[in-house]
Image: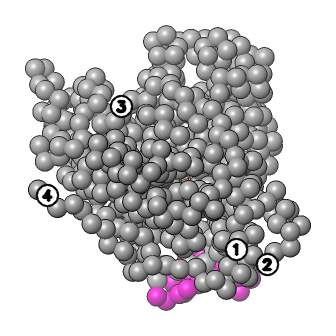
Amino acid sequence: MEEEPKPILVRGRQDVCELDRARLALMNPALIDQKKEGRTIDEAAKPFIELTMKEGIETVWDRYEMQQPECKYCAAGISCQRCAMGPCRIIPPHRVRGVCGADADLIVARNLLDQIATGAAAHSDHGREIVLTLHGIGKGTVSDYRITDSEKLRRLAAEYQVNVQGKDDKTIAAALSQAMLEEFGTMGNSLRIASRAPKATREIWENVGITPRGIDREVVEAMHRVQMGVAADYANTLVHGLRTSLSDGWGGSSLATEVSDVLFGTPKPNESLVNLGVIRKEYVNISLHGHNPMLSEMVVKAAKDPEIQALVKKVGAAGINLVGLCCTGNELLMRKGIPVAGNHFNQELAITTGALEAMVVDYQCIFPSLPRTASCYHTLIISTSPKSRIPGSYYFGFEPETAYATAKAIVKMAVENFPNRNPQRVFIPVEPVKVTTGFSVEAIRGALGGSFKPLIDQIASGNIRGAVGIVGCNNPKVKHDYGHVTLSKELIKRDILCVETGCAAIASGKAGLLQPSAASLAGPGLGPVCRSLGIPPVLHMGSCVDNARILHLAAELGNALNVGIHRLPIAGAAPEWYSQKAVSIGAYFVASGVYTVLGVMPKITGSPAVVSLLTEGLKDVVNASFAVEPDPLRAADLISSHIERKRSELGI
Ligand code: BF8
């Protein structure tokens, strides 16, 4: 019999100093009330935020306050930590160059390229892991996963010119994954999957010299360019940033999305629940947090194992309640209808329900301090990626070859932790909200009756003025969920359809905007269209790598009309972004021709030249640009004027 995988406690238990807790808890009740209201608009989160302040449990908002005032040079992007001659800061009028001679423009541009490359690497490395799993299935080394959407496998194979005639799924998987892996380090001069973009868009890339080549190649070249003594011109540096981001959106993220659909199923509309109220008192609660569906899908399977179910009975729980957080949550919600406890700023609060037996994480957007939060309760933080061994967590090395055994050991550990729960500390005073999700490109096409023509007709007639992709994170610089929800509500009121991913989509879910009944909040054109199709005015399209779905949808519309993406009445927005991944997403939206409004200022204000290039100059390069507008109502004005301008240019 195979030995059961055992965890390692990474660097020992992390405990929060009781003195720290006592100090944090000494807050005046009026201040607690004020802070609770100032930190979030998520009504279900407020009681937990109050609890953290009363009990002295540190959260992201406390740490943000402790970091104030921020360094104004770092905030403006004009500090450089790149080499050992520094650190350097640009302080006019005298300190206008770093030790190496770089001026403010170059320092800002290099820092930004670094951020884009980091984000592109994160998405694409996730994509590679998924493609490698498909490869393992094809080669017979991975047996715990199977191909769920054989039709999509064959469609992708046709796109990659892999012969499918008379071949079984496994043989196709081997050949297709090989062709996909070559996209990472291809000898060619373009990515095959990027040829989904409309011809006019690809011609723009070709003319500007930003056609993405190998996925790894663009990231490595970006890293080369930020080495001191390489990048010297800010504009030339940023143009490579666009190319790098395209290798993410049309490359690594597209592969992550498409192959996840092949392995776990292409999402279809389904119903579920969101907010912290999805955590259930009588159950063993396990939250799945992070990004890669490979881990979470296997945990879902292991939770049904008869041995595990017997153990659940033995510990006296009513069952196992799996709940998602962040993008792993989105993946499970889209495909399996598994409830989501919340977005980025709900991760610590989920622990404060006192009813979470384990938080299972892989990578990205996971606060490294979670084991400290968990030490105030019985919750176990279980880390699983060799790339993200978190001190204070129990670590299982998760590999596709041994996925089921590891997932089962993880679930077992969570169930065995149920008796350690302190019933007096269980606190779940909120009810979840209903959502309809699962709007993959295929599902949208299906809901429209098999082609995008009805959507195009509604846009042409003006019932729907256009569409906006609202994406991204939470950031303590913005009241939690306020940016997302205010912008979405304002746009649907103006008959603009919203398609959303990531933490933006979860914010809309918590606010009730992902229900068909939210059509009543839409304008006189969009509302009836949603009612006739039975869909919400805000469509949940998935996780952050699933922003590729938004690109593919834009490509479908562009191809149907035979125009470049830049000519469509569409826009992008990231009202509460924080992550380098979001920088890459914003850059590939713009490089693909999508005007994109950010709610948080990037660290670029130290270079007026960079600001002007990104907000104006890029219009002459890729026919799109960035705007920054922290007020979501004014952002809605910018977006609707842009959409109306595009409509009149198209003559509709
Ligand atoms: O990839 S939206 S906070 S969870 S980075 Fe992170 Fe931002 Fe959420 Fe998903 Ni995306």
Furthest residue to the bottom?
85
Q: Earlier in the sequence, mark 3 or mark 2?
A: 2
Provide the residue span drawn in magenta. 84-104
Check the image and report above or below for 212 versus 611.
Answer: above
Calculate the distance from the C-alpha at mark 4 to the C-alpha at mark 1: 44 Å
* Residue of label 1: 56
Residue 356 appears at what percent x and percent y?
52, 57
Q: Earlier in the sequence, mark 1 or mark 2?
A: 2
Query: Nearest the camera: 258 or 240?
Result: 258
Residue at left 81%, top 42%?
633
Check the image and report above or below for 533 versus 559.
Answer: above
Tell me which amino acid carries mark 2.
Answer: Leu
Residue 276 appears at what percent x and percent y?
62, 48
**Within the image, what quadrant is residue 437 found in?**
top right
Query: Nearest the camera: 173 or 24?
Result: 24
Check the image and report above or below for 97 versus 361.
Answer: below
Label 2, secondary structure: give it.
Answer: loop
* Residue of label 2: 26
* Residue of label 3: 265
Query: Nearest the camera: 17 or 423?
Result: 423
Tell me which amino acid carries mark 1.
Answer: Gly
Residue at left 78%, top 17%?
524
Magenta run includes residue 97:
yes
Instruction: Name the mark on residue 2.
Output: 4
Label 3, secondary structure: give it.
Answer: loop
Foreground label between 4 and 3: 4
Foreground label between 1 and 3: 1
Check whether the beta carbons of the residues at disc 3 and disc 2 lie within 8 A of each other: no
Residue at left 23%, top 36%?
146
